[in-house]
Image (cartoon, helix red, strand yellow):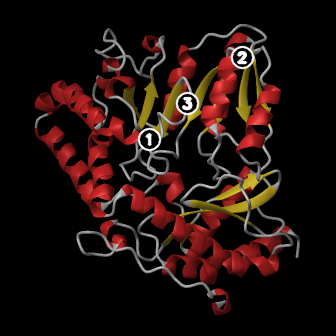
Amino acid sequence: MDSVRTAPAPAPVRLASGGPARDAWPLDGAIAHLNHGSYGAVPTEVVRHQQELRRQGDLSPVAWFPRLPELIAAARREVAPFVGARAEDTVFVPNASAAATIVFNALHLDPGDEILVSDHGYGAVTMGARRLARRFGARVRAVTVPLAADADEVVERFRAELTDAVRLVVVDQITSPTARLLPTARITELAHERGARVLVDGAHAPGLVEHAATGAGGDWWFGNLHKWPCAPRGAALLVTEAADRDELWPLIDSWGAEESYPERFDTQGTIDATSYLASPLAIDFVEREYGWARTRETMTALADHGAAVIGAALQPFVDAPVATDVGMPVVSMRLLRLPDGLGRDRRDADELRLRLLDLAGIESAFTSIGGVGYLRLSVHLYTEQRDFDAFVDRAVPQILAFAEERRGG
């Protein structure tokens, strides 16, 4: 499929330390890594730092664990400004879904109350909202947002659904399945006018959106550090200035339970908190080696180029435009339509992800929207032209074969 490679290939990113970005991540060279958005990737320098932190804890547990709350507090003082927040408003949590659960656990609803979500929401968070509703005899309703809707249309869709019964709005700053922005600050303003509170799911926002927490609006905001900031897995932030934030509690009660917010979150017994402690180095690594503003620009160029290359290879086999308009795109991810028969539901999309990893050595992500399947392409500084070429050469034939199987050919 060499004929599709017509766009100029961007040069591999080189870091300030002199080497190619790809060499700074301990990624398997036999695999094409085009799914940073799901699980992230941790630079070797940060991996080694986390390993050293664990070693310190193993050398003297009695010296390590009693001092751990102080270390966690120091780390959040370093990390909070990265999302535009104050340390006193910020706590570490294991991941975005944990943050949502912490907020849901603190809320009380009455029978007949409503929680408003969008049909672009992250499945696990929406499941948590449904569980909250069941506890109190409330209900969850979803706002339908067209894939290509611009900011004004999104706001009007929420306005139409904000009844007096709505007590909570849960909305994504960047949608996971559809890789688009939502105007959460404007939605928050609307919700507050109607007496509803807003939980902003900013799982993908740190690193992609400057000052992600403070620009999002919302009564509560959370975001992952293990995605675009490249921190170790198990590191996320919950940020709130809400007057009732002392009703927020860690998922596990520990000896810090009698402390106030945020200090009670710094004490979590014998958890492995090294992902929290290594997060400042991950953020600093990208800034020191390339700069965060420049990183966002480069990821945009890489994502555009990869979408053009892969889209050209798929277009002859798709009866609609492969390049998909998502209304408010983000810098690092692109949505590409798949041939008919693929991605009919979430299970089908996940099956394709594993099939391409096993048979083609491609790390990728797929999603299903209204019964239509899409590739969600995502990149970081380590992404190179060879990854896009590998997808065209190794993944596209598998995609076409799988589509043929599904169509019964």
- Which residue appears at 80% of the width and 19% of the height? 163
Residue highlighted by disc 1 = 211
- Which residue appears at 66% of the width and 56% of the height? 350
Measured Cα–Cα span from mark 1 to mark 2:
26 Å
The C terminus is located in which quarter? bottom right
Residue highlighted by disc 3 = 217
Dot 1 or dot 3, earlier in sequence: 1
Above or below for 323 versus 183:
below
* Three-letter amino acid code of the residue under disc 3: Gly
Measured Cα–Cα span from mark 1 to mark 3:
11 Å
Residue 185 image point, x, y percent: 60, 33
Q: Is residue 156 left or right of residue 251?
A: right
Residue 39 image point, x, y percent: 48, 53
Residue 401 image point, x, y percent: 75, 77
- Which residue appears at 81% of the width and 78% of the height? 317
Residue 137 visible within the image: yes
Dot 2 or dot 3, earlier in sequence: 2
Residue 194 is tagged as 2
* Three-letter amino acid code of the residue under disc 2: Arg
Residue 10 image point, x, y percent: 48, 79
The N terminus is located in which quarter? bottom right
Q: Secondary structure at mark 2?
A: loop
Measured Cα–Cα span from mark 2 to mark 3:
15 Å
Q: Is residue 102 left or right of residue 337?
A: left
Q: Secondary structure at mark 3?
A: loop
Above or below for 280 versus 161:
below
Q: Mark 3 and mark 2 in contact (Cβ < 8 Å)? A: no
Q: Mark 3 and mark 1 in contact (Cβ < 8 Å)? A: no
